[in-house]
């Protein structure tokens, strides 16, 4: 998916919502356990209930991998039914040396080899250029590199300052910028880091930012938009638990839709305020 | 596997060799392609040919993941036949927020859930404490945290100095040390970083170090031992390509054994020199 296709989606749906599919067999409604593949069944209904309201879906790979081969089968089937107009994000946070990073790129980008063909993948920057570049070589695909994450441990190393006062996440953005461009590169910035968005935008004014942490993790949408939105929107805000686990009853898909509508309405207002639409 | 079991293995086999199982369908001998699962068949013969010479096996997960579900099946079957006296290392370089890191721990440590029960996993530190700690909570299991890696990109961020002159990999070791101990925590240090081993040993005198980069990547075993060996050995030196791809003919397992013997002999000398045996 190209950058302009993504922007068109955002303007058309008046939304920059990404729905996280961190589907946990212990949290989904009990009645689904009677189905052959409860995880897939859950995802299918969540997707049907939200696809007109969001522009991206992001399965976190750990939730599938933890179930071994049957988890990978649920992931493959889920990928197959993801709406083609939405950006599909494999939230895998992979990172390894060059020849190995290329294997990971095949794992998530090349359906002929792996059965999966996501549009994008999240990537950890610690191992440097040869661990990121292989993902940038696939036409029409995106690497979404961790910059400043939403979790408590995000402050352990990412905000360490060098002798010039530049924090690690700033150095990551400055250097990774030279390996790709806003057409194939995004950054992960946690919604819990509101004030940091203005720092991020100094280094990456045009790049899309994938923003987890709204909802269950306590991030504030208005603050994210105030400091992070650019003229193309430039934000994909992810919500997971507040949407997919809005109800644990038979009405879970309807409840998910209600939560997605709430967020989409807020997003429409922010897009208008930012003169994107 | 406990630390003392590992040390016993090293003394008994007079070796601290780890064999990497980065098994690439395009590099294995052609005749194996006639088997139902060529990757597993290759691994089985490599393991049979080397298990008395090494103390650990390290499949790099990317090589399996890139083949989708059939790759995971090859990995599961390989894990099943790994000799129980050897440390099994899932080279996965995972790293995600707390609840997700726990899912990754289940994926590689809990065979009832995932089909896999490795002794240890490599972990990326960028996301901080809650991304590492879940792996340390499994009894008898190890987290092997990336510190200073062997690849060219290893120098992009890992050697950035803070205002006190401490490099990022040093800060990682100092902080991660407080989350675990030498019984459940190791560090990855590339063999190509010879002189850095003395810096590492200042911060982590007792921890085992997993050392890739000997062989194809050009690292020097004697230099690694000179600066990195401690009284318990404290090193697991990995070789992959130089062993498993020593021949691409029918004799590949014999050729692998010959290369492993060469390394084991050098290692025996180093262990004697270091008064470990």
Image (spheres, coloured by chain):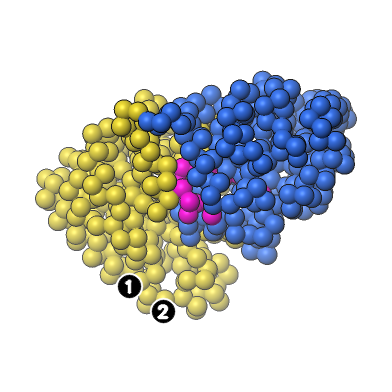
Chain colours: A blue, B yellow
Q: Residue B249 carries which label?
A: 2
Q: Residue at the spot x=17%, y=40% of the render? A: B231
Disc 1, disc 2: CB below 8 Å? yes
Q: Identify the residue under disc 1.
A: B255
**What chain letter is assigned to the residue under label 1?**
B
Q: Is B192 displayed left or right of B155 in the figure?
A: left
Count of numbered tags:
2
* Magenta stretch contains residue A128: yes
Residue A155 percent location from the top left of the image: 49, 26
* Residue closer to the observer: B265 or A125: A125
Circle 2 crowding by C-alpha within 10 Å: few under 14, some 14–19, many from 20? some
A177 up-or-down from A219: above or below: below
Label 2 marks a residue whose chain is: B
Write the start and end of the magenta stretch as one range: A120-133
Is residue B110 at all visible to an observer of this figure?
A: no
- At horizontal 38% and vertical 38% (from top left) the residue drawn is B160
Location of residue B4 with respect to B116 vertically, above or below: above
Looking at this view, is B104 or B257 the one in front? B104
| Image position of B37 (left or right of A232) | left
Residue B238 is drawn in which quadrant?
bottom left
Picture coordinates of residue B189 (x, y %)? 33, 45
Foreground residue, B41 or A44? A44
Q: Kindly state the secondary structure of the residue where label 2 is placed.
A: loop
Residue at 59 percent of width and 55 percent of height: A136
**Tag of residue A227:** none
Between A49 and A147, the residue placed more toward the observer is A147
User: Which is more N-terminal, label 2 or label 1?
Assistant: 2
User: For residue A46, what is the image quadrant?
Assistant: top right
Residue A126 lies, with reference to residue A229, above or below; the image says below
Q: Does the magenta stretch include residue B169?
A: no
In x, y percent, where is residue B81?
45, 56
The quadrant of the rendering that contains the C terminus of chain A is top right
């Amino acid at each position: 998916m190209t950058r302009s296709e993504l922007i068109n989606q955002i303007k058309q749906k008046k939304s920059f919502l990404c729905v996280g599919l961190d589907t946990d067999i212990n949290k989904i409604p009990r009645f689904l356990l009677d189905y052959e593949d409860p995880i897939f069944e859950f995802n299918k209904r969540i997707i049907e209930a939200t696809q007109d309201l969001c522009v991206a879906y992001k399965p976190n790979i750990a939730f599938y991998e933890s179930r071994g081969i049957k988890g990978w089968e649920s992931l493959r089937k889920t990928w197959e039914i993801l709406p083609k107009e939405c950006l599909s994000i494999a939230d895998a946070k992979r990172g390894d040396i060059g020849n190995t990073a290329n294997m990971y790129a095949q794992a998530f980008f090349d359906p002929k080899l792996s059965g999966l063909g996501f549009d994008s993948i999240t990537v950890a920057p610690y191992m440097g250029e040869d661990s990121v570049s292989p993902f940038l070589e696939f036409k029409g695909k995106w690497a979404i590199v961790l910059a400043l994450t939403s979790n408590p441990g995000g402050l352990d190393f990412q905000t360490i300052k060098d002798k010039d006062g530049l924090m690690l996440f700033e150095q990551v953005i400055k250097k990774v910028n030279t390996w790709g461009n806003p057409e194939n590169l995004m950054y992960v910035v946690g919604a819990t880091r509101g004030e940091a968005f203005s720092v991020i935008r100094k280094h990456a004014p045009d790049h899309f930012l994938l923003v987890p942490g709204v909802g269950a993790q306590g991030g504030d949408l208005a603050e994210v938009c105030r400091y992070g939105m650019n003229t193309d929107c430039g934000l994909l805000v992810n919500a997971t638990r507040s949407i997919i686990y809005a109800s644990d009853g038979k009405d879970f898909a309807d409840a998910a839709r209600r939560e997605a509508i709430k967020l989409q309405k807020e997003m429409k207002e922010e897009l208008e305020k930012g003169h994107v639409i």
